[in-house]
Image (cartoon, rainbow, N blue to C red):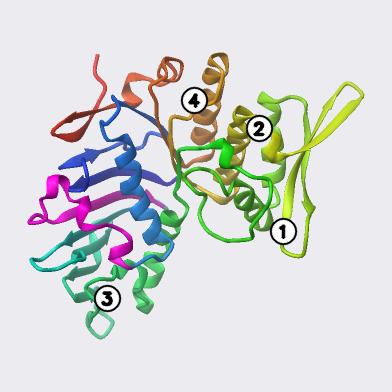
Amino acid sequence: PAMLERLYVHNYRCLDNFEFSPGAASSVLLIGKNGAGKSTVRQALAIMQAIGFGEGQVKNLAKPSDFTRGHSDVPMRFELTLKLGGKRYHYALALELPPAFHQLRVMSESLSIDGAEVYTRQHAEVQVKRPVSANGNGQFSMDWHIVALTVIQDRGASSLLQPLRDWLSRIVLLSPLPPLMVSETTAEPGPLQISGSNLVDWLSTLLESHPAVYATVIEQLQKVMPDVALFRFEKLGRDSRALMVQFKSGGASDEQSFERLSDGEKCFFLSAVLLAANRWAGPIFAFWDEPDNYLATHEVGQFIVELKRCFAHHGGQWIASSHNAEAVVNFSVDSTWVLARTGAASCQPLTV
C-alpha cells in the first residue's frame, strides 16, 4: 500500500507551521469551521500533484501573494513523508522571494528514501548521491526557478525518483461541481479536475489502459443505482465521443446521456470511477472536499462507508472534509482531525 504519513506546510496562505500526520490510516476525516484551512490543504497538495505531472516552473506553482500574512522574508516550505512500495520517502521543497524579486525561486530541495539521501539542492546547485562504486556524486547547476524533481534524469537516481513522481501524478483532488460534468470527451490528457468537469475524459483514459475498470464501475453504481444496466461511449465525430448510461426497470429500458443525470447521480458515478481507478490503476491518494454535497441525507452514510471500505480493501488513501453530521459519525475518533484557525491554521487529532 501507499500512504501519506505526513504533510508539513509552512508560510503558505493560512497554513503556518502546519502538520498533518494521518500515518497508516486508509481513510481520514478533516473537520473545522469555514476558513479553517481545509481548501488550503487541498491547494498545497495540488502543488505536489502538479510537480508529479512535470510542472517545474515555480511561478506556476506558487505566487508571492501566497505567503502567510505577506511574510516573504521567511521561506515557504512543503514536506511530504510517504510509505511507498515498502520504503519511506521524504521530499522537501523550500521557496523564497529575495528582495527586489518578482517571482519565487527554489531555496532548497531534497529527497531521501529510508533516511538515505537521493539528492539535495541549495539554490542552483544540485547534488545527486551515487553509490561508492560509481565515480563520485553527480553535481550540476540548474535554473533557480525550476523544481529539480521534474528534471533530474541521472541514470542511478531516476529509478528511485519515478515511484514518487508516479504517486504525485496520481493524486486526485476533488470539490465536485456536477453541473460542469459533461457527456462529451475532449481527448485532452491530464489529471481529473477538482470540479470533476473532465470525469468522462478521465474514465475514457482509464478504460484504455485498464479495461477491468468497466466492471468495477458498474458494480459500484448498482449498489446505489440498481437500475443502471450499462454505460457506453457513442461516437460523435472524428475526435469526440459521448458517455451514455442505460437504465433497466422490469422489461423497460431507457438510455440517456451522462450530462442528463442528476447532480447526486453524477457524484455516485464519480465515486464509482474513483474506486475503480484506485483498484486497477492505483493505489491512489484522494482528497475529497465535502463528499456529502448533492446527496440526500439518507444516502450519505452508505456512500461514506463504501468509500472507506474500498480504500481499506484495495490500498490507497482517502481524505475527506465535511460539516455533515451523517458523514462525521462514520469516522472513528482516531481517524478524525480538527482544523482550527487561530491566526494560522493548525491540525490536531480529535480527542474525547
The residue mark sitting in front, 4 or 3, is 4
Q: Which range is magenta?
A: 57-84
Place of residue 63 in the rendered image (x, y in percent of width and height, measured from the top left): 25, 57
Instruction: Return the residue at label 3.
Output: 130
Q: Secondary structure at mark 4?
A: loop
Q: Secondary structure at mark 2?
A: helix
The answer to which of marks 3 and 2 sits earlier in the sequence is 3
Instruction: Return the residue at label 1.
Output: 240
Distance of label 3 from label 2 (alpha carbons):
47 Å
The residue mark sitting in front, 2 or 1, is 1
Distance of label 1 from label 3 (alpha carbons):
47 Å
Q: Is residue 186 left or right of residue 136?
A: right
Q: Residue at x 54, y 43 (%)?
A: 196
Distance of label 4 from label 2 (alpha carbons):
17 Å
Looking at numbered disc 2 in the image, what kind of residue is underneath it? Gln
Question: In the drawing, what numbered circle is on residue 292?
Answer: 4
Q: Secondary structure at mark 1?
A: loop
Quarter placement of the N terminus: top left
Q: Is residue 172 visible?
A: yes
Mark 3 residue crowding within 10 angstroms, few (<14) / some (14–19) / many (20+)? some
